[in-house]
Amino acid sequence: MRSTTINNLLPGLQVVRNYRSEWFSSDLLAGLSVAAVALPIGIAYAQLAGFPPVVGIYSCVLPPVAYALFGSSRQLIVNPDAAACAIVASTVAPLAAGDPGRYLDLAIALTLMTGVLCIAGGLAGFGAIANFLSRPILTGYLNGIALSIIVGQLGKLFGFDVPSAGFFRTIAAVALRINETHFATAAVGISFVIVLVLIRRYFRRIPGPLIAAIGGIAIVYFWNLSAAGVATVGEVPPGFRAPQIPSVHFDELSPLLLGSAGIVLVSFCSMMTTARGFAAKNGYSIDANRDMAALGVCDLASGFTHGFVVSGADSRTAVADSSGGKSQVTGLIAAAAMAAVLMFFTAPLAFLPIAALAAILVSSAFGLFDFESLRRYYRLSKQEFRHSIIAMLGVMTIGVLPGVLVAVTLAILNLLRNGSHPHDALLTQVEGAEGVYDSEEHGGGPAIDGLIIYRFDASLLFFNSDHFKERVRTVVTNAETKPSWFLLDAEAMAGLDVTGSDALESLHDDMADRGIVFAIARAKGRFRSMLELCGLAEKIGSEYLFPTVHAGALAFHASSAADRAQVANSS
């Protein structure tokens, strides 16, 4: 029993117990490959989030270890992520007011708060929020992040400072200062952008970020470009720092909580997209609730070691998978390799040019921008294409964190719109087939004279009950001949609330006044329970509640035959 509990809490231990020795060579190669890519990207993302370079390395060491123990994906690598970094910067920078020490303190607090929210959400079963942001909305949000990153790095690529002021204002500031370009810096930055783009396109197995980092260090060191004014990372302190508990003022809690909620939503949705994709490719499934809690543990591990928020890193996960990684041991080896660099090999990092880091970020942003999906959304659904564009423009115009609110608002509006106007159908007979079918899908087969069979393909709830009543009344009014029966097929109506039951009762009473029998077929589950609880089942009458549509149609025919016989006898 105790062993089962431990395995449920730490599924990674099961991998260790069942680990096959022949996997190790593959995991070792994959882990070193991940470290080669993750180390320079981590340093670059630290710059993006507003931290010293070493903070990016801190964020790459313990989080993969935590996920290997607590997560359910065999390939997923948890590291700094572009979207999370952008939200960190937009949340913390206004509060820190230019104080680097305060910036780090608030960032640690934000990371720990994000971790607590993720753990609480996972334990409460909120892993379903991974399905909350639709793929087009998430794509639009990430596309906006990608474009914002590219524009935000232009100043570093050309060798002058440009304050972060939104996408379009930053472009205007760069255009006004382009004559201040530092040519040696621009030559380094643009050259590495070209190299990284070519590697990404034609030589995917080569670790481009590592090539940029090593190449940049070599160029600065041997050509003494620092003396020529090319900015570098500077000294990177070796080793880990002792954990610290950050101090937060009461008036800072609200913006930090809002930022952490935005990070949870975006980073977890993005992480689940990556984890599920690689799980499907390798033939296993993901536990969303467990992974939400695991992400929280990763954030706590990062925060307590002076790192910042992390997420599922798609580029590093792709490296792990393409390099043949078999298990979570890949992440452990990658973490060990990065810890070794932090302990013993930080001296060369002092020569790493800022322009090379900017090139790494620009190249990563090119990979983050998903143009092909936009084309697909445009072809398949103009509405979802518009949602994607609006989410993208929200990030670019009003900022990263408000862009989260735009994305969430779009998701809610889309959900309400689809839920409030679900598909419905009139059911008719089809020649040569048994049963009844959607009249639109089968060319409007012959209706059953005097009987309307109507299907509503959603639960009947407060936000769609008025639409339901309107549709039913329209169907009855537009019938070619006055119906004597209205049969509701409730098979797709899984739920029913008080407002929905009131709508059903109103329709029942209206039809009774017009001499139309109101009947229901295939009521089940919560829908049937609510009918009985509110007394509507008794009011309709058990003789008009049918187990199948066929049974309802037979009852209608029997009733019609009895009525005709009665009319014949009376005449």
Image (cartoon, rainbow, N blue to C red):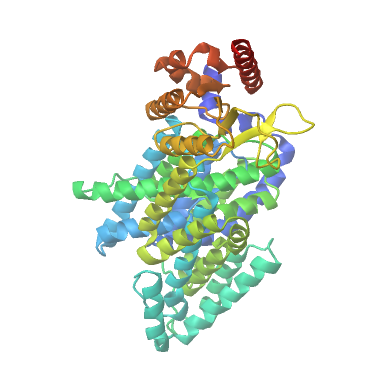
- Front residue of 63 and 232: 63
Q: Quadrant of the N terminus?
A: top right
- Front residue of 73 and 280: 280
Q: Is residue 278 left or right of residue 58?
A: right
- Front residue of 78 and 133: 133
Q: Residue furthest top?
A: 569
Residue shown at 44%/43% (left/top)? 416
Q: Residue furthest bottom?
A: 179
Quarter location, residue 198: bottom right
Q: Is residue 68 above or below residue 43?
A: above
Q: Position of residue 444 (x, y in %)?
A: 68, 40
Residue shown at 65%/16% (left/top)? 561
Q: Is residue 425 above or below residue 264?
A: above
Q: Is residue 326 visible?
A: no
Please tell me how many numbered marks the rendered image carries: 0
Q: Is residue 471 above or below residue 561?
A: below
Q: Is residue 427 left or right of residue 397?
A: right
Q: Quadrant of the C terminus?
A: top right
Q: Is residue 496 left or right of residue 259?
A: right
Q: Position of residue 230 (x, y in %)?
A: 45, 80
Q: Is residue 285 visible?
A: yes
Q: Is residue 450 above or below residue 139?
A: above
Q: Residue furthest left?
A: 250
Q: Residue furthest right?
A: 432
- Front residue of 304 and 1: 1
Q: Position of residue 489 (x, y in %)?
A: 57, 27
Residue shown at 55%/61% (left/top)? 368
Q: Position of residue 559 (x, y in %)?
A: 60, 16
